Image: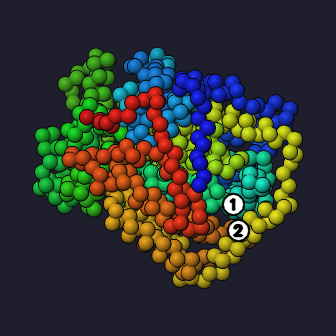
Amino acid sequence: MAILDSKVPKGPIKTKWTDYKNKINLVNPANKRLIDVIVVGTGLAGGSAAATLAELGYNVKAFAFQDSPRRAHSIAAQGGINAAKNYQGDGDSTYRLFYDTVKGGDYRSREANVYRLAEVSANIIDQCVAQGVPFARDYGGLLDNRSFGGVLVSRTFYAKGQTGQQLLLGAYSALNRQIGRGKVKMYNRHEMMDVVIVDGKARGIIARNLVTGELEKHSAHAVVLGTGGYGNVFFLSTNAMGSNVSAAWKAHKKGAFFANPCYTQIHPTCIPVSGDHQSKLTLMSESLRNDGRIWVPKKMEDVEAIRAGKLKPTQIAEEDRDYYLERRYPAFGNLVPRDVASRAAKERCDAGYGVNATGEAVYLDFSSAIQRYGKEQATVKHLNVNDKALVTKLGKEVVKAKYGNLFQMYEKIVDENPYETPMMIYPAVHYTMGGLWVDYNLMTTVPGLYAIGEANFSDHGANRLGASALMQGLADGYFVLPYTIGDYLSQDIRTGAISTETKEFDEALKSVEDQINKFVNNNGSQSVDYFHKKLGKIMWNKVGMARNEQGLKEAIEEISALRAEFHKEVRVPGGANEFNEELAKACRVADFLELGELFAKDALLREESCGGHFREEYQTEEGEAMRRPEFQYAAAWEFKGEPKDAVMHKEDLVFEDIEVKERSYK
């Protein structure tokens, strides 16, 4: 039985990373020119890693399935990026960011990795400012901060509601510089189809040119996966439609353990589903919960009148509104963590208080913030604070400056003005905390194969705090991987170029060819989306926000049967040697169908509620998640041919520097 070695260094947590860097092996600048690294994915994690590794002197091949790294899904991140710089002077520190992250993840992350993340967070902001990222600034010119859920301080740096876009443009500029120098060879419109293992080490990939359909062999001394998460296993999610699990899943099938697949984040502030015609969901940034108040009507007759179109939310008196987060969690109010806010919204809607036609929506209301900001501005400008029209106008200007593009996006999608009437929101699948198991070096159980950003499992436990995804992606790419990969590559400075003319590359290529030919010659009766939607409904209904033993067992059987039907009945029009999006989609959905079963199996065996994973059998009398100490481990799954045969290995999560206690937000 394989033993998981996290390689966490000994010593005090505050000096672990510094001491570790002082002792690991390095590759000198002249020898870096002799070493090739493949980076798959060019979002914030992959793009920053590729740029930094090339800057250090390595020869980098970077792969993106989009037509440009600028289209990576990182661009969709809205609200901000966390860092412990304590600009507000409100008590923040490296330790508090570490504590909030571990607590927010319900004590299901690796302590040493999280402390390192908090430690390097401040460097990320300095790096991005130097790149020209236009972070918001306060009146005095310092970088501004706002709060996100699950914390009591303001540590989130932001650029309006487009922080991901601005950070990605910073990483993209650094990457482009290295492309211009010839140190990065960029392969746009290329998708990784398999990882190639030679003598037990990751030595390359098989990639498909998505424009021509040609399969290519690419070799390197190490392979880095920065390929994001697998939220699209639910079909409807806030992820871009192209986001998929295939690179990580192919690595899993070649020996990389997959950790905590059932850990999924349900984001509380998304535009509700409007019908079966939708292909994705749209996120409304968590930053909106800074100023927006979440509520539903107290009276059922008001709910029914709103659904019937006879009553507007603005006509409901303040005393007839249930601000349920403020009522249930007075200490944090609307800024509880995402899993808590999501479950609370579901509870109100399940009780019949949902405010849209489907009964699955709650209000996010900015009227109080508009009045508060308006009065403040009127006071500053020595104007009449009792002039309601003036106060409203001034307040809207402040809200527009902070969230304007988000409000504009909402209005375009819903055709309602959120300045005048409350937004409607409902939870949706957003982020996946599970991923490839990695050690302290960010290396998987396959030597030479690394996973960074959302593709690995290590930092967020059972629930990611808002604004921490961008922090982890850039921390891994800019400041962690470039150190740790050198320790491994120091053994390869005399290896020479890795040949692609070997049986291992030929066998991997043949395997990919066989799968592709099977799909294009299948002549089934149903489209790829038909199966993807069916999988998504099983996942959402039985493996989603709330789960139970019976539903999970049913889901495992249903997904297994659906997978068999998919391979028999899927129809992929077009050919293999051409631009064929249906073929690319079929390969990805095949992997989702395998992942979905392992996901449900992992959820079934985790007999507790923690973070974003809510088992109905394990809840307190008040309906809160009930964590169980015997499940304080990471579940790392080893591939054994079929998801049902996967073997689980446990990494016990030992907390020496933080006290594991009740996770209360009241």
**Which quadrant does the C terminus fall into?**
top left
Instruction: Please give the name of the residue rendered at 31% of the width and 23% of the height, measured from the top-left corner.
Output: 377
Q: Is residue 321 left or right of residue 546?
A: left
Query: Is any atom of residue 155 visible in this view?
Result: no
Provide the residue designation for mark 2.
512
Mark 2 crowd level (few <14, some 14–19, many ≥20, 10 Å Cα): some
Apparent side of residue 238 relative to residue 228 in the rendered image (left or right): left
Q: Is residue 430 left or right of residue 121?
A: left
Q: Amino acid at mark 1?
A: Asp
**Looking at the image, which residue is at 41% across and 47% down?**
631
Q: Residues within 10 Å of mark 1 (few under 14, many from 20)?
A: many
143 lies above or below 259: above
The reply to whether the C-beta atoms of the residues labelled 2 and 1 are less than 8 Å apart is yes
Quadrant location of residue 100? top left
**Residue occupied by mark 1:** 194
Q: Is residue 257 left or right of residue 417?
A: right
**Residue 637: horizontal and vertical position, in percent?**
54, 56
In the foreground, 352 or 162: 352
Tell which circle, 2 or 1, labels the residue nearer the N-terminal end.
Answer: 1
Asked which quadrant contains residue 483, the reply is: top right
